[in-house]
Amino acid sequence: MWMCLDSLLNDTPMTDHNDGRVHIELTVTGVVQAVGFRPFVYRRATAHDLVGTVRNTGDAGVKISIAGTVEDVEAFIDDVRERPPPLAVVESIDIETHEPVDDSNDRFQTFEIVSSTQGDGGSGTIPPDTGICDGCLEDVHDLNSRYYKYWATSCVDCGPRYTVIESLPYDRPTTTMESFPLCEGCNKEYTDPGDRRYHAQTIACPACGPSLSLLSDDRTELATGTDAVTAAGYRLNAGEILAIKGIGGTHLACRATDQDAVSDLRERTGRPEKPFALMAKSVEQVEQFARVGQEERPWLTDVRRPIVVLETLGGSALNRDRDWLGDVAPGLHTVGVMLPYAGLHHLLFDQLDEPLVMTSANLPGKPMALSTEVIYEELADVIDAAVVHDREIAARCDDSVVRVVDNSRRFLRRSRGWVPRPLPRQETGPAVLALGAEFDTTVALAREDEVVLSQHLGDVDGPGTEAFLEQAIAHLKELFRTDPAIIACDLHPEFVTSRLATSYASDLPGASGPTNPIQVQHHHAHAAGLLAEHDCDRAVVITIDGTGYGPDGTVWGGEVLDVTRNSFERVGGLEPFRLPGGEAAVRYPARTLASLLNDAERVDELIADQTPLSQTEATTVRKSAEAGVNAPLTSSAGRYLDAISALLEVCTERTYQGEPAIKLESTAASGTPLSLEHELEGNTGHCYRDADKYAGMTVTYALYDDRPVIETSRLVRHIDRLHTSYSTATVAATAQAALAEGLALIAIQAARERAVPWIGVTGGVAHNVAISRRIRDVVEDRNFRFLSPDQIPPGDAGISYGQTVVATAQANARGELPVLNSNRVY
């Protein structure tokens, strides 16, 4: 008989005979494999004089069979429920009662960890990787320790998990550590119940574990072991660029304060402007060049060690003679920083006094390199040397990136340290595989009451990254033993993920002939994910980003939506404008000004100055915009910000995703927005107007397809006039504020008309702190409740989660599995 824990303890007598002894079996689910849970169970069971067994199961759960007195069993269950190991999360405990065991039963003479079993799949959770713990770090620096200066030191409380697990149950033979048999010393600790490495599957030491090598640019082995680390530190100090293979992938590294090294890295990788992440030795070192507030500090030191986006200081205590941060993050007021999270990193910093650039080791269109072969095949012209090891990486996993917005964490990238921890699935239904979008891609697997979001997959429009996408899908399905009944994807017909989704849908059980996945409109996925994250049924959501394919065939991106999980209505946003040349206008945003300014001569001049086009060609671009020829319509907030960036000459060419808008945000950070008036029917008024500062600028609105929209072209012309009287920083801040306030007021009007108490914001532009904060202030000032992303990234990395939400809601609304041969858009 199965029953819940509380029912067992509170409502059912556990025994009536046999001297008060009982025999029960517990099935524990949650994050209970690869976190030292079985050793913990062993120690607590023996402490309470219990006998029996504990084993991992193939569905990532743990099965415990125990016998003892009622009091001891209850105390043991309380320990499991209330005091699990640091990395464990107990989500449920199911209990089955059995007849009390006889003293002669050989299975119940002691308590022991027994061989794992295969399971039918699906109920458990696999832990993410974590940074090295303090105990292991002490071992690495202890001259008398077996682990002295060993780069891969770990225990049950730390180290790689997701990136070494090949299949379940979690035991050494099912990880990439299978190739490294334990030496006598490691085996002694592995079998000692009192040791923190008891049954630690990643245990290894210099005698038996993965080995480290330093290779030259032509792959000649220069040093091994601790000598490799010493030589690598010397080369970094000398200004060389190194590939460093770590836990879930490979970084390209150089000394951050070395202008020549950083410049060489940019030239060799083709990343002329893209901001590089830094790794610093300590929080104290970070404080020499960036602001570490009380909200940011816990994330910097968190055991998961994400990259944290911080504001830079005006003058760095490191190399004050020049602005080295301007080389690392050109044109930005922020920099991404992480602390060392592996023994290898700490050993390197024992020899370094300055931070390192640590950026992903890949070329454009390629995933991050994992093996020595790929490092030298693809990056031989980039690196001067490489630090590599012989432990295989089972799952590529980039660093996570977070930023504190309004005192709360916001993910720019949810990857190492969090993946594959599940997210809530507020509405259960058939298993769903969602393939996300095209850029900053993740995939999601929804099963039972949870959604597993994959690691960062990046842009999947290249052959190498498409293969990575398929590998990630196969890995998730294998680990979680879930075969999807529904496939979901973006509405865009030309996305790689859309094409792949069609292929997967054709292979679903029961499919016959041509089939179609569920296509979810891009911004509906953004908004539905926000609703599900907050367990909200309906809200008016401001969904702002760069690009999303609309059902009308235009490019959306500045939308106010009335949203439920299975439907949406477009109730307002930005007035559409044109993108002359399509993708060419994305690269050179001055082209977009042809659709937004009414001064032909000025437009031609801006286009000719900021693009490779001649004056005559610039005129042709302007005329194509006027005629609507090769100039698709868009309502994108991202493209509006790009256009302002070009107008103010902040950024005239996009060399990485979001660059013009990101640099505009940094320019605006030093400015104070002018007060604005808004002429919106039914909500005429002003936001934060100060009569002494009022610039005479009014944000105007119009009806477009019967929905209120900000008059984008008039707004841009107003901003252009402001620039003749105010600083670039002030005008940039005002342009952002106008967008934020305008969309917030449209959302408020829609929410009032529909009696909806919740207003939210999501999409890639929600990463902009000033815009997100201004929207929140306006919304809360009008007494509406505000929703913002927390558990999922607001950008396209969260799209796959939202797709599972919509697909589940649609399937449940029909009360049956979807008809695969229909073509549905939601």
Image: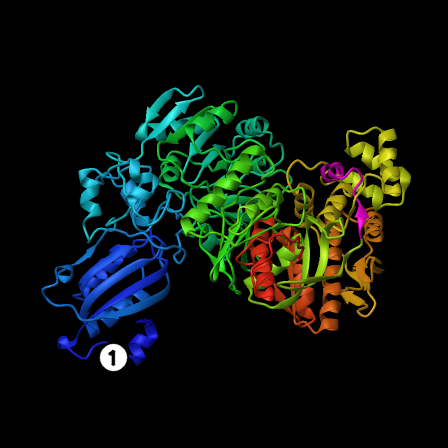
**Left or right: where does residue 740 sit relative to residue 174?**
right
Estimate the x, y position of residue 345 in percent, counting from the top left. Answer: 39, 38
Amino acid type at image mark 1: Pro
| Rendered location of residue 369, percent (x, y) | 48, 33
Outermost front residue = 512
Q: Quadrant of residue 388?
A: top left
Residue shown at the point (43%, 26%) measured from the top left: 373
Where, quadrant-wise, is the C terminus in this rendering?
Answer: bottom right
Q: Position of residue 258 (x, y in %)?
A: 52, 30
Locate the N terminus by quadrant: bottom left
Q: Is residue 278 above or below residue 615?
A: below
Q: Is residue 260 left or right of residue 480?
A: right
- In the picture, residue 504 is in which quadrant? top right
> Which one is nearer the viewer's eye here, 347 or 797?
797
Q: Is residue 680 visible?
A: yes
Disc 1 crowd rating (10 Å Cα; few below 14, some 14-19, many 20+) is few
The reply, left or right, for residue 290 in relation to residue 786 is left
As rendered, which of 610 and 636 lies closer to the eye?
636
Instruction: Give above or below for 173 relative to 566.
Output: above
Residue 82 visible in the displayed image: no
**Residue at 54% across, 41% down:** 316
Q: Residue at x 58, y 32 (%)?
A: 364
Residue lying at 37% horizontally and 40% vertically, measured from the top left = 346
Query: Which range is magenta?
Result: 576-588
Residue 304 lies in magenta, yes or no?
A: no
Compared across the picture, whether 195 is left or right of 399 comes to left
Q: How many marks?
A: 1
Q: Is residue 449 above or below residue 346?
A: below
Question: In the picture, residue 30 is in which quadrant?
Answer: bottom left
Q: Is residue 587 magenta?
A: yes
- Asked whether 460 or 807 is in front, the reply is 807
Question: Mark 1 highlights which residue?
Answer: 13
